[in-house]
Amino acid sequence: MQYKIQSLVFPTDEKHGGCRKLFYRGDSGIYNQEKQILTLGFAQRCDFVTYLNACSWQKWQKYTSAKILTLHLRIKGEARVTFLGYHCEALTVTQKEFAKKDYQVAEETEIEYTFPDNDEQMVGFEIAALSPELTIFGGYFTVEVDEKEMNPVVLAIATTTCKKEDFIRKNTELIKRELLSGEDELAKNLYLHVTDNGRTLTEKDIHGEHVFLHPNINAGGSGGFARGMIESLRQELEATHVLLMDDDVLVLPESIRRTYNLLRLMRPEYKRSFISGAMLYYERPNKQHEDVGTIGGPLKGAKINHEKLRENLANEQILAPHRNSYAAWWYCCVPVSVIKEVGLPLPLFIRMDDAEYGMRAKTDFITLNGICVWHMGFTTKHNAVFDKYQTLRNEWIGQATTGVMPDVDILAQFKDSYRTEIMRFSYDTAELILQALEDFMKGPEFIMQPQGDKIVAERHKLNDKFSPLSEVQGGDAVQTDNIKADLPLRFENRLFLKLTWNGQRWCPKFLENPNLAAIQADWVLQPERSARRTQLLAVNPYEGTGVVYRKDRKRFKELMQRYKKLVKEFEKNRDKIYQQYQEKRDYLTSEEFWREYLGI
C-alpha cells in the first residue's frame, strides 16, 4: 500500500519570514497564506531540496520499512521539474539528477514521479515556471509499505507550562486546528496533555476532544513531564509513545506528523529509540542549537545554518552514539515500553532531568531534518542558580542514583567552576557552587519533598543583579563587540594567579591594578583580563547589561575554608552518599513516588 510520510510545508507563521530558505530556496514568488499556495512568474525557480521539504531518504530506509518513494505535486500552469538527490562525502556535495520533465496543465493537477532505487541522503525537486503564472498548491511524498509491518501507534503529547499562558494557548489551538480536527488516522490516535505547574489556566483555556489540562504543583520540568507520562499511561486509549515538548516553543505541526509516520513504519530493531527533535533558535530561526546533546562531549548538529544545503547534509549524518548522549525535552519522543522499563524521571526540578533520563535509558536517538521546534536560545541568559547550582547538584544526583555519566569527574568540574568564579571575585556564584555539593551530600531525602521551587527561590538571592551598562560603573566605556576575546596569558600573570589566587590570598599593594576591567559575564575566567585587578565589570553583551565584582579578602577566606572542608568531607563519605541514593533509585523513579510527591 502507499503511505504518506511527509507533506510540503510553506512559511505560515510570521516568524518564518526570517527563515524562508528553510522551506524553499531561489525566487520567493508570491505566497498566499490564506489559500496556502505559491505562485511563480515566468522563469522564476524554486528549490525544495531544503531542511524542511527534502525527504531524508537515507534515514527513512534505515529506520523504517519504507520502499519505493514517490513525489506527488499539485500544480497549475507550465513547469519544468527536476528530480534530484544529494549526498555529502567528506566536504564534497554530490548532486544526482534523476530526471527533468516538462508539464503543461490548465487546471490544478496532481503529477507524480517515482524515484528509482537510490541511497541518497536527501531527495527532492526543483521547479521552474515556463508560463507567466505557475501555481504550486502543495505536495507530499509516499512510500510503499507492507500493511502487516506497520506498527499500532497512539501518540500522546505531554507539555509542561508555568505562567506562559500566551505560548501554551497558541500551541494548543495550533495542534487542535492542524492535527486533531480532521478525520484521519493521526487525529484519532493523538492526545494532548497540558500540565500546568503555575495553576493559572482553566478549562476555558485548554479544552477539546483528546485535550486534557492537569493542574499541578510547581514541580519544575521533571515533575511536569512525569505527570504527563503518568496521564499518558492512564488515558482512555493507552499511549504507545509520549512526545515531551516544551511550552515556549514555535511548533511546526508537520514535525509531529512526521514523528507519527516514523513510528508507524519503524523497524523492530529501532522501536526502543527516542526521536530527538532539533532546537532552532527562535531569535535566529535559520540556526540550529543542537539535535542530540552530550555531557562531556560535542553537541551533535550544533550551530548549523539550515539555509545551506551542505549543512543540511551534514546534519543528516548518522553518527555512532555516545554513552553520555541524550535528547532534550523541548522535543523528545519516548516509547512507553521504555518508560515502563526504566521508570519515570528523577525529581530534579530543573536542569539535567532530560539528560539523566536519556542516558539512563541507554537507547539510540533518531533525528530527521524537519523534525524540530524553535526555542529561545540560552546564550543571552545568565542564571547561576540554574546553570551552576542546579546543574552541578543534579549531575551528582543522577550519577549517584542511576549510574549515568560513569566517566565524568563531577568533582573536577566542581573544583574548576569554583576556581573560575573565586578568581574573578564572583563570590555569590562561588557560594552557589558550594551549596550544590552541600545539598547533594544531604542525601536523597533532600529531593524527596516537593520543595524545588522554594529551593530555587532561596538560592536566587545569590544570583547576580545585572543593570543596564549605562547605569553601571564604567559601563559607558565598554566595547561589547570584542568582550569574549582575551589576550594571551603572560607568564608573570599566570604565576600571580596561581600563587595569590588573583591577589586574594596575599598581594603587595604595588602589584594591584585598581582600574576597572571588563570581562564577559559567562562561566570563563579570561585570566589576562582579570589578573591583578581589584574590580571587574562582568558584561552580558547580548542584553547590554553588567555587574561589578570587587575583591573581598574576607569573603574569599570564608569561602575557601568552607570549600576545603566540603571537599574533604565529600571525599571521605562519597561511597556512603552514593549508596544512599542508589538504594532509593527504584522508589524515586516509580509512579508510586510521583503520585505521592505531586499529590495526585
Image (cartoon, helix red, strand yellow):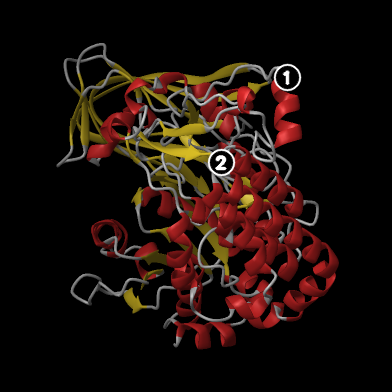
Could you say where residue 503 lies in the image, as x and y percent from the top left?
65, 34
Looking at this view, is 507 or 541 the one in front? 507
Labelled disc at residue 136: none
Q: Is residue 53 visible?
A: yes
Residue 225 spot, x, y in % from top left? 48, 69
Q: Amino acid at mark 1?
A: Glu
Which quadrant of the structure image shows residue 73? top left
Query: Which structural element holds mark 2?
Result: loop
Disc 2 target residue: 425
Q: Are marks 1 and 2 in contact (CB under 8 Å)?
A: no
Q: Is residue 150 visible?
A: no
Q: Position of residue 329 (x, y in %)?
A: 50, 57
Q: Give the residue displayed 73% in from the left and 63% down from the top.
A: 399
Kindly identify the residue that appears in the image at 42 percent across and 41 percent down. Answer: 377
Q: For this view, does 376 lie left or right of residue 490? A: left
Camera-side residue: 89 or 172? 172
Residue 176 location, x and y as percent? 27, 63
Mark 1–mark 2 Cα distance, whole angstroms, equals 20 Å
Q: Amino acid at mark 2?
A: Phe
Q: Quadrant of the C terminus?
A: bottom left
Q: Secondary structure at mark 1?
A: helix
Image height check: is 527 above or below 394? above
Asked whether 464 or 103 is in front, the reply is 464
Q: Residue 128: name its quadrant.
A: top left
Residue, disc 1: 492
Q: Looking at the image, is 292 positioned above or below residue 527?
A: below
